[in-house]
Structure formats: structure tokens, C-alpha cells
Amino acid sequence: MWCAIYRCSRKAETYLYVVRVDGEGDLSRVPEELLTSLGRREHVMDLELTPDRKLARVERDEVVAALKERGFFLQLPPPAMPK
């Protein structure tokens, strides 16, 4: 499965993964309210989610399941470390 990944301007370290269709990220299944709250989106990369693909902060299977079910996956920043 191929996906497009976008960095979100209003939320630091937040990335939106969407299914890639015809070489483009398909944002049609992402709720408009979510798109608005995330601000401007900057395309970071396209990525093939193969079974052996390792992702830095999330499990590949979680991303694939969300893309199949909802059409998008939102990667939030890691929790803040206590001081």
C-alpha cells in the first residue's frame, strides 16, 4: 500500500498519512474540520507500507488499518517528558 505523508503547519511534529491514489494523496476522506485545524499541509514524502517497513514513531500495521478503515492516519507528537 502506498501513502502520502503531509506535515501540518499548526501542530508541531504532527503528520497526516493518506492513501495515495493516481500518484496523489487522497484527502477526500479526511474530515474538513480536521483539515482546517491542522492548517497548511506540506507534502513530505510518499511511502510504500510493505510488511517489513519500520516506521519511527508508529506501528506500520496501525497505519495500514487506519488507512483502510478511515482513509487517513494522524500521527501526533510524542508526549512531553515530565520535568
Image (spheres, rainbow, N blue to C red):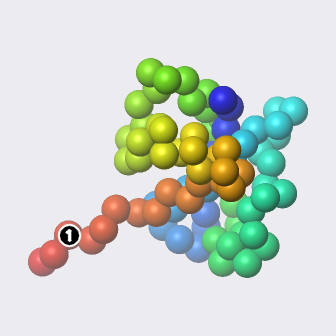
Residue 27 left/right relative to 68: right
**Compared to 33, does 23 lie above or below?**
above
Residue 79 left/right relative to 24: left
Callout 1, which amino acid? Met
| Residue 78 placement (x, y as % from top left) | 34, 62
Residue 18 left/right relative to 11: right
| Residue 16 placement (x, y as % from top left) | 61, 55
Q: Quadrant of the C terminus?
A: bottom left
| Residue 36 placement (x, y as % from top left) | 73, 76
| Residue drawn at the location 50% of the way across and 57% of the way down | 75
**Compared to 81, does 45 lie above or below?**
above
Q: Nearer the viewer, residue 59 or 22?
A: 59
Name the outermost residue toward the left: 83
Answer yes or no: is residue 60 visible: yes
Name the outermost residue toward the right: 22
**Compared to 31, does 27 lie above or below?**
above
Q: Nearer the viewer, residue 38 or 30?
A: 30
Q: Quadrant of residue 28?
A: bottom right
Label count reads: 1
Q: What residue did someone put label 1 on?
A: 81
Looking at the rendered structure, the secondary structure element under dot 1 is loop
| Residue drawn at the location 66% of the way across and 78% of the way down | 37
| Residue drawn at the location 80% of the way across and 48% of the way down | 26
Answer yes or no: is residue 43 visible: no
| Residue 47 placement (x, y as % from top left) | 61, 32
Q: Quadrant of residue 20?
A: top right
Q: Residues within 10 Å of mark 1 (few under 14, many from 20)?
A: few
Q: Quadrant of the N terminus?
A: top right
